[in-house]
Image (tube, rainbow, N blue to C red):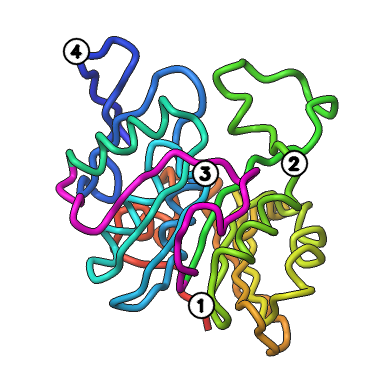
Amino acid sequence: MEPVTEHIRVEVSIDRVLGGRVSLRQGRQGYRAGMDAALLAAACDAPEGARVLEIGCGVGGALLAAAARRPGVRFLGLEANPEAAALARENVAANGMGERVEVIDGDIGRRFHSYGLAPFDAAMANPPFFDDAGTLRAPAEAKRQAWIAEGGLAAWTAFLLKAVREGGSITLVHRADRLADILALLAPKAGSFQVRPIHAHADAPAKRILVRALKTGKAPLQLLPPLVLHPRTGAKHTAEAEAILRGEASLGWL
């Protein structure tokens, strides 16, 4: 993404993502949507007519990229940070997606049913990577909500399971070392797991994973071919990763 300064709001920049198809206002300080959001959007495989929920949508990085990729799908973003939610709504309007993309203020600490929403066909999330603030150097306050999962990963997976209908899909991007936790937390009510490792380099261990599960799914777990993001020399991204970032390819599931 190549940032373009917005002069009207000093602490906000505009990034062009998905090959320029989506413009994204986001704060210069705090968490900024990047590769994880792009991967999550590329992994959204909702069919035409489906309803998709993203929890913790931030300023709409994954939400709007997924909506641009899936023009026949309706999206709802749920965001606990009021400033990020406000920017997300601005981004929805700026990209002309107001007829089928909505962002509401909300916290996964509330029960899903308290929002008065019907279960979704699909739900996706990029949960904060850490459960315990004591396990890492204290993040800047502006980044804390994006880094520390209040209620832990268990709260996020429980909300996702409540948010989708039977047979609906749940898609997560997270740290590779949390794979066992993710599977264990979803397994009581979901199955048909598919896992795609994400490697920074072909000769390095995976640092990220994309996990897709179906609520009440029964099929065996499938470990899919990995995505390698960067070559050791030459271009910034591999050809496959570059096509995904530009919106020319998606991260399909079997």
State the residue at coordinates (62%, 54%): 199
Whichever of callouts 1 and 4 sits on the residue coming sooner in the sequence is: 4
| Residues shaded magenta | 95-121
The label on residue 7 is 4
State the residue at coordinates (50%, 22%): 30
Could you tell me the amino acid type at mark 3?
Answer: Gly
Q: Name which quarter of the figure residue 227 lies in.
A: bottom right
- Rendered position, 215 above or below 88: below
Whichever of callouts 2 and 3 sits on the residue coming sooner in the sequence is: 3
Whichever of callouts 1 and 2 sits on the residue coming sooner in the sequence is: 2
Q: CA distance from mark 1 to mark 2?
A: 30 Å
Element carrying mark 2: loop
Whichever of callouts 1 and 3 sits on the residue coming sooner in the sequence is: 3
Element carrying mark 4: loop
Q: Are marks 2 and 4 in contact (CB under 8 Å)?
A: no
Q: Are marks 1 and 4 in contact (CB under 8 Å)?
A: no
Whichever of callouts 2 and 4 sits on the residue coming sooner in the sequence is: 4
- Foreground mark, 2 or 4, reads 2
x, y percentage for residue 135? 84, 29
Q: Name which quarter of the figure residue 74 lies in.
A: bottom left
Q: Which residue is mark 1?
A: 253
Q: CA distance from mark 2 to mark 4?
A: 38 Å
The label on residue 56 is 3
